[in-house]
Amino acid sequence: MSQPKTRNTRNKRTQSRQQTSKKIDQTIEDTKEKGKQIVSEAKEEASKLIDETKQETSKIAEQQLQNVAQQINSIANALIKTADNMEDGQSWIADGTRQTAQALDKVSGSLRDSDVGTLVRNFEDYTRRQPVVVLGGAAIAGFFLVKFLKNSSNHTQETIKKNSDK
């Protein structure tokens, strides 16, 4: 009788181990599925967040573009008024000023009528066609930026020195 009990006990243990193994396997599969679901949801949320950020950035860029267009238009109008106020002896300066104002007005209109994506594509195309001009312009802009920053720094240092002398 001891042999059937031992066999019976072994069978029960084996069955218990098999059930436990099946439960573990099922838990692992459930965890994998849950993990895939979480990753999928995270990707979806990240995608939504990226889209919202792109839209918001685009909206801000469009607003800034309109602001720049308005500023350029204001400069053009000021140049036209300046040209109108010039005396007869300075007509060649007035004509040049008017031409500059007209060019700025045209740029302002183009900016107002375009979106950021179109401007970027146009700039990229121009850069491919005229890389030397773009690099030269960037170098000149960099030169003026350095001069401006240097002068601004000198002015700040002079102001600090004057205030400390008091």
Image: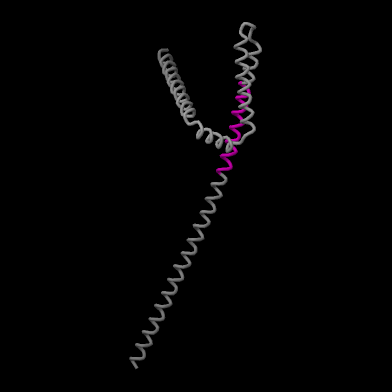
The reply to whether the magenta stretch includes residue 133 is no
**Residue appearing at x 58%, y 42% in the figure:** 55
Quadrant of the rendered structure where residue 118 is?
Answer: top right
The reply to whether the magenta stretch includes residue 68 is yes
**Residue appearing at x 64%, y 20% in the figure:** 77
Q: Is residue 46 above or below residue 81?
A: below
**Residue appearing at x 46%, y 71% in the figure:** 26
- In the image, is 35 to the left or to the right of 82? left
- What x and y, as percent, mark residue 86? 63, 9
Extreme top residue here?
A: 89
**Span colored in magenta:** 53-75
Question: Toward the viewer: 91 or 50?
Answer: 91
Question: Toward the viewer: 154 or 61?
Answer: 61
Q: Main secondary structure of the magenta part?
A: helix
Quadrant of the rendered structure where residue 123 is?
Answer: top right
Question: Toward the viewer: 144 or 103?
Answer: 103
Q: Quadrant of the C terminus?
A: top left
- What x and y, as percent, mark residue 11? 39, 84
- What x and y, as percent, mark residue 57? 56, 39
- What x and y, as percent, mark residue 24? 43, 71
